[in-house]
Image: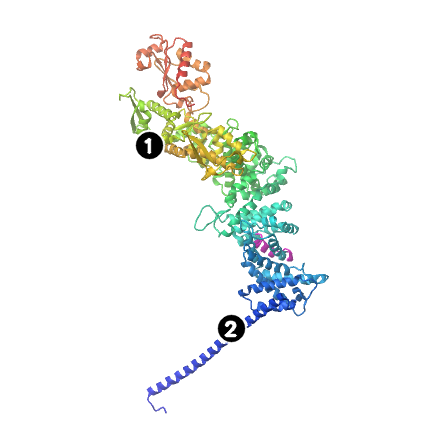
Amino acid sequence: MFSTTQTSKSQFLDKARQAREERKGHKEREKAATQIQALIRRFLCRCRLQRQIRKDVDDFFQACDAGTAKRNALSIFKIARKLLFIFSTEDKLRFEKLCRFILASMEVENEPKVWYVSLALSKDLTIPWIKQIKDILWVSCEFLKKLKPDILQDNKLVTLYLTMLMTFTDTSKWKILRGKENLRPALNRICENIMGHLNQKGFYTILQILLTNGLARSRPSLSKGTLTAIFTLSLRPVVAAHFSDNLLRSFLIHIMSVPAVIYHLNTLTPECMATIQTHDLLRKFILFLSREEQCADICICLEGSHTLCLLGNLIHLGYLTERVLEEEANHFVKDLTDMLSYCQRYVSQKKSNLTHWHPVLGWFSQTVDYGLNESMPLVTKQLQYLWGVPVIRTLFSDVLSKKLESQEPLPPPPQPTTSQNNLPVKNLFKRAFQKSASVRNILKPTALTTLTQIKLQILTGLTYLDDLLPKLWAFICELGPQGGLKLFLECLNNDTDESKQLLAMLMLFCDCSRHLITILDDIEVYEEQISFKIEELVTISSFLNTFVYKMIWDGILENAKGEKLDLFHSVHGWLMALYERDCRRRFSPDDHWLRKDLKPSLLFQELEKGKRRAQLLLQYIPHVIPHKNRVLLFRNIVTKEKETLGLVETSSASPHVTHITIRRSRMLEDGYDQLRRLPVNSIKGVIRVKFVNDLGVDEAGIDQDGVFKEFLEEIIKKVFNPALNLFKTTSGNERLYPSPTSYIHENHLQLFEFVGKMLGKAMYEGIVVDVPFASFFLSQVLGHHHSMFYSSIDELPSLDSEFYKNLTSIKRYDGDVSDLGLTLSYDEDVMGQLVCHELIPGGKTMPVTNENKISYIHLMAHFRMHTQIKDQTAAFIRGFRSIINPEWLHMFSTPEVQRLVSGDNAEIDLDDLKKHTVYYGGFHSSHRVIIWLWDILSNDFTADERAMFLKFVTSCSRPPLLGFAYLKPPFSIRCVEVSDDQDTGDTLGSVLRGFFTIRKKEPGGRLPTSSTCFNLLKLPNYSKKSILRDKLRYAISMNTGFELS
């Protein structure tokens, strides 16, 4: 058999192997065919069974509807078991019918066998029935999750499935228990078992989705009955578990975090609010959240948006339950603080790839649920209850009632070195400070940045509680003299909780008061004296001034961070708001803002050495330094810049000189053409002016600053003349501001820039010019209008006091403002034509109402003072700042800058003028004419006449800020014998005649004259004092022309 070759053997083995593989493959195919057939038979069988069951279910429902089948609990149980066995999405209608049949069975009277719940008492069916009802209720929950309450059909189904849940999670309406109260405990346990099962599967998540779908919108789509059912269902597990931490946590996370749920419950279902109060839920929530780890757990689960919603609901609940809020105030504010602090960690200052916009929180680095945006106005309204009158009265009840528990004097403060430092604060203070410290966390910059979009609403709400701020101040004053200043300063070096609480009270007071002073107008502050009397404002400003000064000068600010830095900005903000108000309209006594213990010489030394505290003092509160010293500092800064730019004559170099030629008849045009193209450094440098007459012939004389001064004064006089229509004067006090119709000049903006440069040059050189600006315009030049405390309406009286009164009368109008027929527009007569300016787009069609009248007032003030002249103002500022660095002027208030421009408004110091007078032409200090002159100025002239005299000789009616020592050129008096046109200066003969009082001839009818460019008085050698007095009085009174002051 095996005698064949090896090849034959191989072939045989291959064939055998192939045969085996074929047999194996055949078996596998047969097996696979069998499996496929089994699967198909099973599928077909299942389909037949499902069809059969569905047919049975349908037949059962049809038979019941037709009345041919007898309804009883057992048949419903069996048909439900069948339906649940094959249940899928296509059985939605069948399940709906099943639920209706079950509920209908529960409504039948006196037929125990029909009641579906009767099977719970059947010995054999109790456990299957419990399982079945759990399944039915969970399927109901699954449907509730997907339904939209705003759709009518879905709303009906929501009602159906909620009714199922309501019916089988509580025994109160089960007819089977009538007369069988002994069964209630057992059936209650079944209900608790059912609720426990639902909770494990996510019952609260379902209710949250349903509530959010129905309430997170501008108008709720849940009816009163539906909302009541949902809330009742959500509360049942909590009550059943005796308010266990686990169930309270679920309730807070899923129910209390639904946007404005308390608002809707209070509006739609007062019964539910009564239930909340019955169970004392607010207290339980507050105490639960007061445990730090539990509060953190809730916040982490909810994230920012929903944490804010929870916060709103808790605040609203507190607002509605004042008794609990008062009793649990400390825990309540701790909870709010913790939740806000959590949110604050994710609030960003700016947009980035990692942030999302939130309508209340601003830019937020956590995911924002945009589905909640519609309900955010209601959440904001809930948050507002926190700074509403009832809640604030509750939180500050001790302060507002002003009940001091003991009247004994405070013991002296302990030394800050002791380790167990306890401030001498009464129990009353402790409680109030603890409350305010927590409320302050909502207000302080680090946490107020949490609620970035409603910050102003918070402060406004607190300030409009009329007696909060005055009583807070009275409360602070109880701490010791000067508002407990010593105690507050001690607290800065203390790190105890009581110190922090005391400082928190101060920060709260400052933030609210600062906001109040910025929204009150002058009538409310000075005449009605809302919240604070003028004397109190003086005391408060003194306290704040000292506190800020000590923080800076004692080095506390240099190392301050966190809460201390926040404290400084709060106190400084309130201080500066008062200072700016005082600068506009004085309420403080003379030298009120100065620090007598600050030596200017020491300050300047420290500034030279670059000491940080001196720089901070100059940055934050320059007003504590006398004005004269600040002017000196300003002049020193200018001098240093001149030295840096090489504009000062030195032994080794002379500054570059720019020569310009000006025609007298075209001074403005020539000056503009020649100076506007010059580089800024050339304008800052030496400019020599040569005047020529109309024939082109040079005038006699060489400019040694005097001619340039004359040129500058003449230029400024021309450009500020209202007849030119570059500038206008305000009604009443005739102050200057840019003319809204200056565009009649083709190059008016370039002219404004040129004027700005010329005024800057005058200030740079220390030349005072008689140009009284409207304060609102100077505020814009200084950049004050960019401050967050700036209010257009406060500056309006400096433009038009009558217009201001009219606008504020609208604010105080008691009736319906719409009756006045105003619109959000301004009609103006522009060169004979009536032009309508819309204050906002479409404003001429928008009526002014009681709701928008405050906006109208501010829009109108802003339009008149800013919008109308914004281009002119911007051009002027551009020119002015090219010469004067705006940082140099930060140490001056608006009135002080006016003094820098126009000189001191104080009485002329004749002794100072006499001391710095130079005499020529034979005059000397003991000359009889000179003695007469000083006597006439001192005793015969009035203050106004002395001002006219100064204007006559220097072109400015006000003395230089630093005294006549700084008048350039110095004031001089020269004896003259001939008329001005014949005057060729001093000769040896004229000097000798003047010195020995020898007259060439009697001056007769000659008048005194002046050369304002040289600050020179040309005085004839009069023979009598009375002649000198009369001639001088006549001369100064005839020096008219265009008057600016």
SS type, badge 1: helix
> Tag 2: Cα neighbours inside 10 Å, few (<14), some, or many (≥20)?
few
**Seen in the image, is 39 located left or right of residue 923?**
right
Residue 922 numbered tag: none
Instruction: Label the magenta part by its dominant secondary structure.
Output: helix
Q: Which of marks 2 and 1 is in front?
A: 2
Going by the numbered disc 2, the residue's amino acid type is Phe
The magenta span reads 239-256
Going by the numbered disc 1, the residue's amino acid type is Asn
**Seen in the image, is 16 located left or right of residue 211?**
left
Specify the quadrant of the image occupied by residue 1003: top left
SS type, badge 2: helix
Residue 370 counted in the magenta span? no
Q: Name the residue under label 1.
A: 681
Q: How far apart are marks 2 and 1 (CA)?
A: 97 Å
Q: Earlier in the sequence, mark 2 or mark 1?
A: 2
Q: Name the residue under label 2.
A: 43
From where the camera sits, is residue 60 visible?
yes
From where the camera sits, is residue 417 visible?
no
Residue 248 counted in the magenta span? yes
Q: x, y percentage for residue 266?
A: 61, 48
> Tag 1: Cα neighbours inside 10 Å, few (<14), some, or many (≥20)?
some
Q: x, y percentage for residue 675?
A: 32, 29
- Name the quadrant of the N terminus: bottom left
